[in-house]
Amino acid sequence: MSAEIEPITGRYLRLTLGGIEQRVYVEEAGSGIPLLCLHTAGADGRQYRHLLNDPAVTDKFRVITFDMPWHGKSSPGPDWRNTEYQLTAETYSALIFAVVDALDLDRPALMGCSIGGRIVLKLARETPERFRALIGLQSGPHVAPYYSREYLHRPDVHGGELCAALMSGLIGPDVPAADRDETLWYYAQSGPGVFKGDLHYYKDEGDLDADLAAIDVTKCPLYFLTGEYDYSCMPEDTLYLEKMIPGTKAVIMKGLGHFPMSEDHDLFMTYLRPVLDTIESAAREAAPR
Amino acid sequence: MLTVESLPDRVNSNEPLVRRGRYVSASMLLELGSASYIVRIRDGRIESVEPKPAVMPVWTFTLRAPREEWDQFFAHRPKPGAHDIMALMRRRVLTVEGDLHPFIANLQYFKDVLATLRDQEGAQ
């Protein structure tokens, strides 16, 4: 057989979330330090496919990603046609802990992008002891609305086409064309109203200055990486986090946008590699000799 | 000067772009600082580009931004933040108003139409 089989394993988790049994799709590859990865609003875990396929990462890390309920191959909520989906900080963090507990992950490193880059702020503030490191990609404290979200979910506008069109400018101009196209395809595939529902958390629930000041990075290291072509979470938004949270540093990634992990893996790794090396050496120092 | 008048040539010869806009029939008022053009589109093809008439102009929706913002947007290699009309909206320098349904429902088409004015001799 000549076809290449990727080293990624996909399975379904049965989780009870908010009293409802949900079927959540999980992919993983590699072994070692658990590295749990959170996809962006209106997308799914495929955004991390390059990371899952990179032996330079999976040799030392057990890379795991999952599709949030309503996204990718995970099931929507029951009676979805009569339900307006809305993500909140509470439901999002409860989901993350449900996955961590179900997979029995021991203080994983957690990397989230966009909404995932936002939730790391709450996790850093409230439950730093549960993680060995937190990485925020495209992290900002809040985003003021700059277009009407009502257009994202109405029968006379194709939601998938609109989501892809909205995202098309959030990608670095020189990334590989195939990666740009696939990144947009994930958005074109998202279910009706899902991106809009995720944006409830992203745009209506922000982190206040007092929330940011309450983060103590001596309890859990917190890293920020942001692409320069992102106008959703703009570089200045991440630089604001750096200013407000002592001990953090915002690295602005040249040539990348809102989806560094799926836009251009090689370029992204030049920024992520030093962070992973630091996490790995900390684990080595902590290991019993 | 920007060659907004070259839009019909740039768009109508671009088959995938015309196909993308095949359900678009609308008039877009483009305001570039003090210069205003009405771009009439039918079935994805640019029918005409004319200065906004002084008397009883009719259009569907407006895109309005200061001239210097458009100049940066139309640059061969626009800087981050000047590279997409949504980026201009995010920075509150581009105003979109009117009947927005055709614009939003065909957002990629309108992004691509405007991008045809980019590069080459676009911003002379």
Image (cartoon, coloured by chain):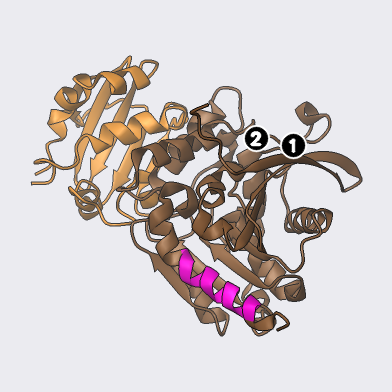
Provide the residue designation for mark 1.
A84
> Looking at the picture, how far across and down is residue A224, in whole percent?
52, 69
Please tell me the colour of chain A. Answer: brown
Quarter of the image for residue B98 reads top left
Q: Type of residue at label 1?
A: Glu
**Residue at 43% across / 66% down in the picture?**
A271
**Mark 2 Cα-neighbour bin, 10 Å: few <14, some 14–19, many ≥20:** many
**Can residue A43 be seen in the rendering of this structure?**
no
> Looking at the picture, how far across and down is residue A117, in whole percent?
59, 61
On whether residue A16 falls in the magenta region, the answer is no
Please identify the quadrant where the N terminus of chain B is shown: top left
**In the rendered structure, are the residues bearing label 2 and label 1 in contact, judged by CB atoms less than 8 Å apart?**
yes
**Residue at 70% across / 79% down in the picture?**
A287
- The residue at the far right in this view is A19
Q: Is residue B48 above or below residue A173?
A: above
**Residue at 27% across / 27% down in the picture?**
B57
> Looking at the picture, how far across and down is residue A145, in whole percent?
53, 52
State the SS at label 1: loop
Q: Type of residue at label 2?
A: Gly
> Looking at the picture, how far across and down is residue A99, in whole percent?
78, 53
Span colored in magenta: A272-284
Residue A63 vs residue B71: left or right? right
User: What chain letter is assigned to the residue under label 2?
Assistant: A
Please tell me the colour of chain B. Answer: orange
Q: CA distance from mark 2 to mark 1?
A: 8 Å
| Main secondary structure found in the magenta portion | helix
